[in-house]
Amino acid sequence: MTPQTCILIGAPVDSGKRRAGCLMGPDALRTAGLTEALESLGHQVEDLGNLTPAPHQPDVADGPLFAQNKTIGWTKQLITTAEQAMARGLPIFLGGDHALSLGSVAGVANYAASQGRPQFVLWLDAHTDFHTPLTTDSGNLHGTPVGYFTGRANFDGFPPVENPVPQDNVCMLGLRSVDTSERQALEASAIRRFDMRQIDESGIARPLAGFLDLVARANGMLHVSLDVDFLDPSVAPAVGTTVPGGATVREAHLVCEMLHDSGLMTSLDLVELNPFLDERGRTAHLMVDLCASALGRRVFDRPTRSYQ
């Protein structure tokens, strides 16, 4: 395993939805031992601390979108930070809700374009997050990042996406909650998508291996966005968007082990951790363990944990 410089970027984004608590996520991941886990694998860790959003207009309380202007501020800040961090190592964005990926993915895609390489995205999530501000019924912008970074229209006020990620460079694993408007848009798209029924029938390794082969053949850069609700809520309760029937701990570790074996991951999101909903830190520890697997921890190296 080649040691890397892992750049921790705290993004306590809590503006993407109405249920508060994700702003505590970055510090919960640190408390669960993320730095220590990565250092034990031989990586160098640089922690940039927690960001704040770029200056933005105040939000209107009764607007159709929740905290739109604050989310725009976060997006501007994260695009700049992501692009700069890519030049120095492997950025790990500590969320914060999934609205942070509007900025993290757009920023890493800018860097990939500057290197003449294509950007790919692996989306590990129960949801597609393929809405636009006009199609979301809830008004929660954490359901829009894939729509944004693939270049869908109607993101008025947001920074223009300079280097949209091509739809066929996006792979979604673990889907099990998709709104009607999202489904229609997704079916008309070239996005690669695998719901939990497909994973139940054929396993999680086959579709992931096919996608990783595609990234490797294209000499692509791979951003991985891991949402807590990719996992079944019985093992990862600290999320405000629980959807039963998610990935098991073993399936999630297999994904992360395959990512490490491929050597393709160039940036990572850990999102939607709401410590207020956790049980003695078990979800935070699991997210740290998955991150460690993606960066080289093997089966026999895993710690035994007790939650008694």
Image (cartoon, rainbow, N blue to C red):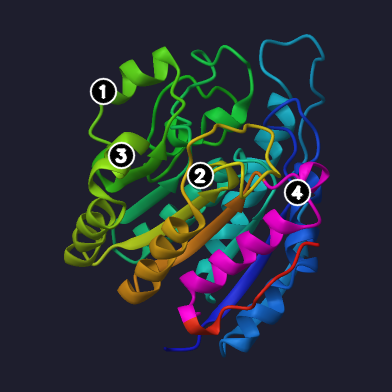
Compare marks 3 and 2 and give the one earlier in the sequence. 3
Residue 286's place in the image compared with 101, above or below, is below
> Cβ–Cβ below 8 Å for labels 1 and 4?
no
Disc 1 or 4, which lies upstream in sequence? 4
Dot 4 crowding, Cα within 10 Å, few <14, some 14–19, many 20+: many
Whole-angstrom CA distance, mark 4 to mark 3, is 29 Å
Residue 34 x, y percent position in the rendering: 68, 71
Mark-to-mark CA distance, 1 and 4: 32 Å
The circle on residue 125 is none
Amino acid type, callout 4: Pro
Percent x, y of residue 156: 55, 22
> Which residue in the structure is indicated by mark 2?
230
Q: What element carries label 1?
A: helix
> Which is more N-terminal, label 3 or label 1?
1
Which amino acid, mark 1? Glu
Residue type marked 3: Phe
Image quadrant assignment for residue 116: bottom left
Vertical side of 136 occupied by 236: above or below: below
Q: Residue 187 carries which label?
A: 1
**Helix, strand or loop at mark 4:** loop
Residue 85 showing in the rendered view: no
Q: Give the range drawn in magenta.
A: 273-299
Which residue corresponds to mark 3? 194
Which SS class for mark 2?
helix
Determine contact: label 1, label 3, CB under 8 Å: no
Q: In which quarter of the image is residue 36?
A: bottom right
80 horizontally vs 149: left or right: right
Mark 4 lies on residue: 12
Q: Is residue 156 visible?
A: yes
Mark 2–mark 1 Cα distance, whole angstroms, equals 21 Å
Q: Nearer the N terminus, badge 4 or badge 2?
A: 4
